[in-house]
Every structure is written in C-alpha cells, then in structure tokens.
Image: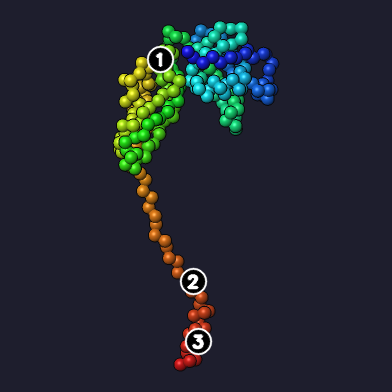
Amino acid sequence: MDYVLEAYKRVKGEKASSLRSNGWVPGCVYGKSMEPMSLKIKNTDLQKCLKHHAAKFELKVEGEKGFLVGLEELQRGPLQDKYIHISFHAMKNDEVTTLSVEVAFHGKAKGQFDGGIIKENMHEITVKGYPADLPDKLMVDVSDLEIGDNIHVGDLAKNYKFEFLQEDHDKILVSCGHPRVQKIDEPTVVAEPVDEMEVAETDKTDSEAA
C-alpha cells in the first residue's frame, strides 16, 4: 500500500514566504485529466513521507479524492530539511507513466576483495510503466562485479515489469575498477643560494694567507 500524504488546498492570496515561515511547504499537483491544483503541505509530514517513500505515494487533498502521485520536482532550501516548493504529477493505474527513482547499491563486489574500487555513476534514473509496477527505489546488487566489470542500465532491463528509457540503456550504473596508484614524486633538492659577497671574502682571505 502506498504511503498517504495529507495536503490542503492553498487559499488564494496566501504568500509562499508566509506559508514557509509557518511550517508549510507550497506545492501543486497536475495531471492529464485535471486542472492544476495549488497545495500546501506540513513540512514535518513531507519530511516523513520523503524519508521512506521518495518516488510515489497517495496524496490526499482535503475535500478531494486521493491521488496516486509521483514526485516531479522538489526545491530545497540551504538546509536540506527545509523545502521551498514541491510538484507532483497524478498517475492513473491503467496508464503508463514515467517516474524518476533513486538508485541504491548493495553488496560487496568480488573485485573489492582484490583491492578493486566501486564507482557509482548514477544515483537517479527514469523508469516507465504502470504505477503499480514502478518502484520507490531501484536496488542494484554489485556482489558479482570483478575488477574491470560494470553494470549497464540495459543489463537490468529484463529483470523488471517496468522499462528504462532507451537512451539510458548504454549508460553505466556502477563499475569496479583497479585501485588508484598515486605516484609520489621524489623530493627536489634545492641548492642553497650562493652569497657572492661571502665568496669574495673567502677568496680574499685565502690570497692573503698565501
């Protein structure tokens, strides 16, 4: 069951800055068969929702029916737990839609036991399918990677009911590479500067002694 996030219609004339000062996050929801709706959501409720359900959830608007929505855009403030604005797009269970989801990696690659290093290239990806088949998060197991191996988006395509965008298939999600060897330069010996006056005095002293 999808997480339920409660929202309220934004009253005409309410300023976004005032809403944020009072613990609200201004936002909107839109879809193919509905008029865009301006909303406000409690900042604390939004934090809880995004902590566990970053991609899709049920948006329950006061006085309206619930919407199955996907997160379209989230604007954050200087502090990561303060949100400036949020946008959702309404989804229908019988319609194919796209959704941007987080990519998370788990497991320890075989190559890491030989000193290899894991490089995570993508932390977000767009998926396409029916809402019920779309994940909140894409989990990628790196356990079988040896040094020199990598996982392309296309390598995962056959494992799910949803699809990836065709233009993403050749992109590398994660790779296991050779450990970096840092070359340490030999210290440069800098000769002390020669004091010409000192040399002249030495030569003079040697001449007088002779």
Circle nearer the viewer, 2 or 1: 1
Q: Quadrant of residue 105?
A: top left
Which numbered disc covers residue 133? 1
Mark 1 residue crowding within 10 angstroms, few (<14) / some (14–19) / many (20+): some
- What type is the residue that disc 3 sits on? Lys
- In this figure, which residue is indicated by the disc labeled 3? 204
**Which of pointers 1 and 3 lies earlier in the amino acid sequence?**
1
- In this figure, which residue is indicated by the disc labeled 2? 193
Q: Is residue 156 visible?
A: yes
Which numbered disc covers residue 166? none
Position in image of residue 134 (x %, y %):
42, 17
Q: Residue furthest bottom?
A: 210
Kind of element beneath mark 3: helix
| Along the line of sight, the residue nearer the viewer: 155 or 116 | 116
At 32% from the left edge and 38% from the top edge, which residue is drawn? 111
Kind of element beneath mark 2: loop
